[in-house]
Image (spheres, helix red, strand yellow):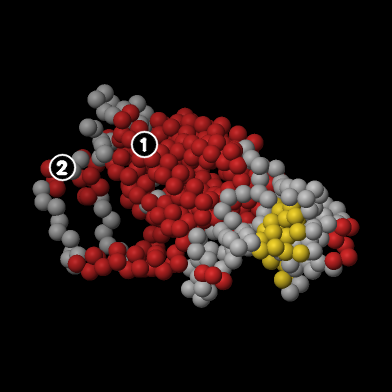
Amino acid sequence: MACAFVFSGILLAVTSFGPVFGFVTGSLMLRFFVDFDKLPKAQIRLEPTDLRWVGAWWLGFLVASCLLFLTALPYLFFPREMPKERDAADVESRLDRKQQTDSVQELSLLQFLKSFPGVALRTLQSPIYLLVVLAQVNLAALLSGLSTFMAKFIEKQFSRTVPFSTMMMGGVGIPLAVLGIVLGGALMRRFNLSVGGATKLCTAAILLCMFSSVPLLLIGCPTQRVAGIFPKGPLPCSADCDCPDEVFNPVCGSDGVEFLSPCSAGCMSVEISDSRITNYTECRCVNGSSWARPGTCGSSCGHLLWPFVVLLGLTSFIASFSQTPSYMLILRTVDPKDKSFAVGVQYMLFRVLAFMPGPVLYGAVIDTTCILWGKKCGKQTSCHYYDLDTFRHRFLGLMVVFICGALLCFLLTILVLRRKAGTYQLPSGTKGGYELVGGQNAQEKKSDRVTT
């Protein structure tokens, strides 16, 4: 029992290694062109830095399916029934023996359906359980949005390639979060925190997380100058070129201004060197030497990337401290026989309220910052350019909103615990870290608390 906190932290942390491997592997796969198996290398003229580059996203599914097949093979060698532990009574606590005596017998489907409303009502009547789950839902919604779009944010904000941005997510953010989850469990074990102590630890972690996330709103690059798009205005220098709206082949002028295509830059000729370097010359819309090169101009504030990544990693590290304590809070604040149901409801709410709507909400917010949509066959496609300041403020601002929501839920949990009639002083010699809060049944369970 004493090591349950550490083991729970390790269990929660191990599940995060999958996304780490996925992000790192994905970054490697995206370095290959999407049709590299169909086109010879000499015909692939795009580079990963080109906005039109599409990586081999489908390779990741092949790798993952092969690994899933290999990891499933060892299960074929497990016995039909696992051997039972011997002399279990010598190591069971008094609470474990009581739970074993009062264990629910195997129910028929009809009996289960009859008892289900009572179990659901009993679980959902616990205000502490509901508040902790809602706090976790806020953090899960935050996680779902960041894991889906943070690579895109880094790519657009700091003019980095998709593989590099994905590597930053998998190589920095998630490992620090894993470390925080394990350390959160270690803190629970070291200080033997009670329900109130675990709630305060969660609150402190989320409060520090909020303070570290707010400066992220200020770290970023301004929107690059794109002729005719940002700032908005006509291009009389190429008005007679009759450039099609659907063409997107960005070039960077020698004056640092970006154009949608060589046509919109008013370029009259093209030069290809022996090393396959392409330059467009005699560009009427480019000031100075009047030439342009393929690709985007990028940003001039790439040096801000590492401060941003470090602060983002620190934020994820601090926030993950609340993962293990909040999980233990859920197990402690419901009736022992309802724990499995409570955990099931928790993960169901994760899917329904966080992981399903979270990415959709983040995507909708990001779409509101687009200043130029692509077109194909007269229909809107993907976004070519974003207002980067608005992108940063709305994307990271939504993250801060979810953090504040989680903080509010944990603060309300502390308030409920202080007002709860079932809060008692433990007997001398008893460690508060193992107290159980069972809602209205706390008085009855007082005598069943575990001593160590």
Q: Which residue lies furthest to the bottom in this view?
A: 38
Above or below, comparing residue 31 to residue 133 in the picture = below
> Where is residue 18 shown, x and y percent of the image?
39, 55
Residue sitting at x 78%, y 66%? 245
The mark tally for this picture is 2
Q: Distance between the residues labelled 1 and 2?
A: 27 Å
The reply to whether residue 202 is visible in this rendering is: yes
Mark 2 crowd level (few <14, some 14–19, many ≥20, 10 Å Cα): few
Q: Residue 183 carries which label?
A: 1
Residue sitting at x 25%, y 50%? 102
> Where is residue 295 shown, x and y percent of the image?
66, 57
Decide which of 259, 406 is in the foreground and name it.
Answer: 259
Q: Which residue is identified by label 2?
A: 91
Q: Which amino acid does label 2 sit on?
A: Val
Above or below, comparing residue 247 to residue 330 in the picture = below
Quick one: SS at disc 1? helix
